[in-house]
Amino acid sequence: MDETNALNEARKLVEKGWCKGTSARNAAGEPTGTTDVDAVAWCPYGAMGAIPGASFIRTTDRYRKSIGRLAISKWNDEPERTKEEVLAAFDRAIESVEP
């Protein structure tokens, strides 16, 4: 899977459900695996890890550049962070992929 598709798929997961403090959560709000069938919310890092056939290193590197930080989870978990900012970072990462 190419970077653009992988980032788009990860963005869709976060748009569906976003979380802080863990890679993924189930409907009860408990931490769960990123690829578990009961996952309903993801942090950006977890969402990128949940996409089968994607290059995790390339997608996370692209996202890191879009936020200007190395620690995606720490950035995501900042108290003032919003879902809109997380999705906007995905948009910047997607736009930065060479055609």
Image: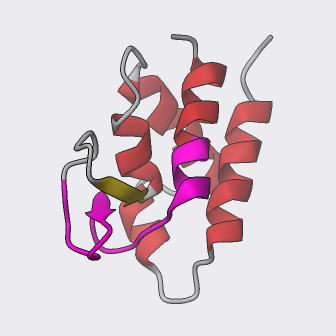
Residue 6, image x, y percentages = 54, 25
- Position of the C terminus, as image quadrant, is top right
Res. 13 in view: yes
Q: Quadrant of residue 73?
A: bottom left
Residue 93, image x, y percentages = 68, 39
Residue 79 to residue 83: above or below = below
Q: Is residue 86 left or right of residue 28?
A: right
Residue 97, image x, y percentages = 72, 23
Q: Residue at x 67, y 56 (%)?
A: 87
Q: Is residue 14 magenta?
A: yes
Res. 68 in view: no
Residue 8, image x, y percentages = 64, 33
Q: Residue at x 35, y 49 (%)?
A: 46
Q: Is residue 77 magenta?
A: no
In front here: 12 or 49? 12
Give the tally of numbered discs: 0
Model colouring: secondary structure
Q: Residue at x 42, y 59 (%)?
A: 43
Q: Is residue 91 left or right of residue 42?
A: right
The span shown in magenta is 11-32
The extreme bottom residue here reads 79
In front here: 78 or 87? 87
Q: Is residue 22 left or right of residue 96?
A: left
Q: Residue at x 42, y 69 (%)?
A: 19
Residue 47 to residue 68: above or below = above
Q: Quadrant of residue 77?
A: bottom left
In front here: 14 or 55? 14
